[in-house]
Structure formats: C-alpha cells, structure tokens
Amino acid sequence: MHTSTPSSTAGHSSPLSRRQFLTRGAALAGTAALWAALGNKSWAATVGATSDAPEVTDLNFGMIALTDCSPIVIAHEKGLFKKYGINSTVTKGANWAAIRDNLSTGSIQATHMLIGMPLASTMGLAGSPKKPMVIPWLLNRNGQAISLKAEWKGKVGADPKALKPFADQANKLGEPLTFAQTFPPGTHAMWMRYYLAAGGINPDKDVSLIVVPPAQMVANMKIGKMDGFCVGEPWGARAIADGIGFTSVSTQDIWKDHPEKVCAFTEEFALRNPKTVKAVLKALHEASVWLDDLANRPEQCEIVSKATYINCQKEIILGRLQGHYDYGDGRKKEDEFYMHFSRRNCNYPQAKYAKWFLSQYRRWGMVTGTPDYEGVAKRVMRADLYEEAMQEIGYAHGGADHSPETLFDGATFDPANPEAYATGFAVKNLKG
C-alpha cells in the first residue's frame, strides 16, 4: 500500500507545528497497529494512509460469458469504475478454472465468480490450489436453469422424480445418464446435485457428472455429449431457441432468491488495498441499481451481447432478464424471481450463504468431517468491506440476515445449525 507523506517547505515549519504533526502521527500509527493486532487489518490499512484514493488504480477484471457478468461490464462501459478512481479493463475467461488461476496469480485483480469458488480456493477443495479469497460483494441472485434434452419433453417436467426411471434404465444398460455443470464446487454443480438428489438420484453413484464451460454447453448438447446441464443464462434460453432442449426448472424454482455470482478478490489483495476494493464496490453499486431498472434492460442486452462479452443474440438474453420464462415444453410464466442485481439486499455478503455451500460440500463428501462453518464464512464473506463502502456513499443496506431458507424439496436450512442440515438428507455421500 502506498502511504502518502505530508509535503514540507524549507524554512516555513515552526517547532510547534512539527511537534503537533509528530504527536498526531504517532498516535495514528499506534492506533492502526493496535487494530491490526486485533485482527481488523482492513481498518488499520485504511487509517495508515491519509488519502481516500484507491491504493491501486489499474485493475483488470475477469468475467465469463454469462448474463450475470453484467454489473462488472456495465460499471466498465459506463465509466463508473473511472468515477471512483479505477482504470478498468475487462478480460473474458475461457472457463472458471482459468478465472480462478488468473486471480490467484494476479493477472486479474477482481473477478466475476461462482460464489462457491472463493470458498473452495480458501479451503483448497476439489482440486483448487489453496489460495485464500474474499467475497465483499454479491453480484446477483437467480437466473440459472437446468436444461434437459428435447426427447424428454412431456415426460419430465419440473419434478426431478420423473427423471429417476430414465436414470435407472440407463444404469441397467450400463450407460449412465450424463449431466454437465461448470465447476465442481460451484453453484451450477450444487444446483444440479440438489435437483438430482431431490428426485432420488445420487449424483455420484447413479449418473455421470462432467464439467463443460458455460458458452460450450449448447454445442455439446447438440452432439449428444450429455443428457442435461445446469448453467447460467443465456444458455438455457439458447438451448430452447436452438431446439435441442427445454428447461426443467430455473434455479429460482429450486431456491427463490438464491445467491449466485460474486465479485471476488484474493485475501492478500483486499488486505493490502482496502480502498481499492471499496472503490470497486461503490462502482458496482451504481451499476447494479441501474441494472435493476427494467427500462434499462434492453440497453444492458445491447452491451453485454457483444462478442467481447457474452457473444449471444440480445433477444435471447433479454426475455428471461425481464421475467418472461418459456420453459420450452409448453410451460410459460412471468417469474417475479428473475435475475436481479441490487434489490432485496442482494449485494450483502451474507455469512449464511457460505454456510449453505459448506453444508453441500459436507453432504457430498468434498470435505472430510465437519467443516469450520463459522470460521470459513467469517474469513471469506467480508461484510466489513461492504458495510464501509456503503456507509461512505450513504447507502442504507439491509444488513446481515440469519433467517432460515427453505428449498423446493421442503428441506429447511438453519444457518445456526448447518451440520444437522448437511447430514440430514436421505441422499448423501458423507465422508468422515
């Protein structure tokens, strides 16, 4: 972190002013050291500098070709990062593993990410090299989907139990069904696992799960590589437009207002550059409020549909962004839980969301024994940075939420007891 020092003019400083400066400087340094010793490194780093300007001004942001990259793209395209002192560039990644690695090595400094990825990297899970990462901002809720191949239209609707006979038959033939997700500890993998298990299908024993990058899902379904997939929009809508599949459920059908993508940083970067992080959050706030004005969604689609970003027809992106859900099998509805970016306290990094994902890692044997739910959630979900940034711009957020969440199978997650939730499912693969 760069520390500014007061300028001096030779022959113009009095003994009194020098003593005042030294006394006050020593007091400030002592206070910062005390707070750092107590663990409040963000505050200590902040008071250690006399300027409110970002410590680092040139930032490269990562993103994947999904509609929920929009807050980062809009903040970049509309000069909102610049407004808060950040010179931004945006780099599209080929897949989530590349995004993770680029953040870890510092070739990008902030990124669009699946909420589970910083948790997995901090813990070193599921093949992720151990690199602590933090989440000071949730980018969006809702807006993903589970798509199934077209030949199951009219046979499998929204109930995953209707899929079980097909899974059983495929296993009898020695050719298990194949389902794709985008990253093993990510959101799409957890939604797919939860959906299958709700239908009595063990995702680790009864079917094959593979990893496919988001933008390649539709092409791989066309050539018969899988029987279904879970991914973010616009690729669920694109599968319908191309006639290769239909939506069984949207992810908000599984969990209304579920957390999805985040803006992530390495822990090291956030500790060294808290003002930079907060500048990013302020810009994302403005972009997110703009995005949640539905009158702006056509313009949003004009921007994010470009080849530089999502590279998909804007009309395909727009429909579900406006809540118009055509499932592709005769079902249609106006969904009030379409993808949103700011409303209903969307952006607050809730500790309970980290605990829910940890409960699923426990359920599926991605961790051995009981994980440190409280410790990991506190380390990764940096509500302190979010609250400081919003206070500085005078935004009244909704604060921490510790209320239970009930998903579509009727199971209720109580963040006060995540271990009981994790171990209480009929379909599970506990380890230790």
Image (cartoon, helix red, strand yellow):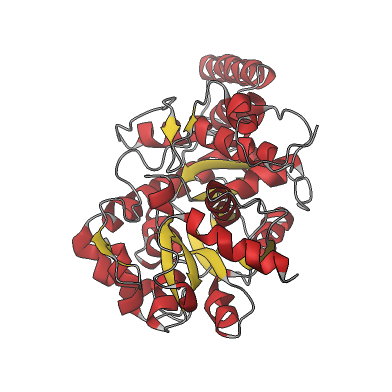
- Counting the numbered discs, the total is 0
Image point 51% across, 70% down: which residue?
65
Determine the residue positioned at 40% across, 77% down: 240
When the figure is inspected, residue 13 is found, relative to residue 191, above or below; the finding is: above
Q: Along the line of sight, which residue is nearer the eye, 215 or 391?
A: 215
Q: In which quarter of the image is the C terminus?
A: top right
**Image quarter hosting the N terminus:** top right
Q: Please provide percent x and percent y for residue 401.
A: 41, 27
What residue is drawn where x is 72% and y is 71%? 173
Nearer-the-camera pick, 17 or 254: 254
The answer to whether 14 appears left or right of 362 in the picture is left
Residue 82, picture quadrant: bottom left
The reply, left or right, for residue 329 in relation to residue 146 is left
As drawn, 213 above or below 400? below
Task: From this view, report whether residue 69 is shown above or below residue 306.
Answer: above
Residue 300 in the image: above or below residue 39: below
In the rendered image, is residue 293 in sight?
yes
Residue at image point 74% right, 37% down: 430
Estimate the x, y position of residue 326 in percent, counting from the top left: 30, 69
Q: Which of 276 and 129 is in front in this view?
A: 129
Percent x, y for residue 397? 33, 33
**Is any part of residue 181 visible from this angle?**
no
Q: Position of residue 279 (x, y in %)?
A: 45, 46
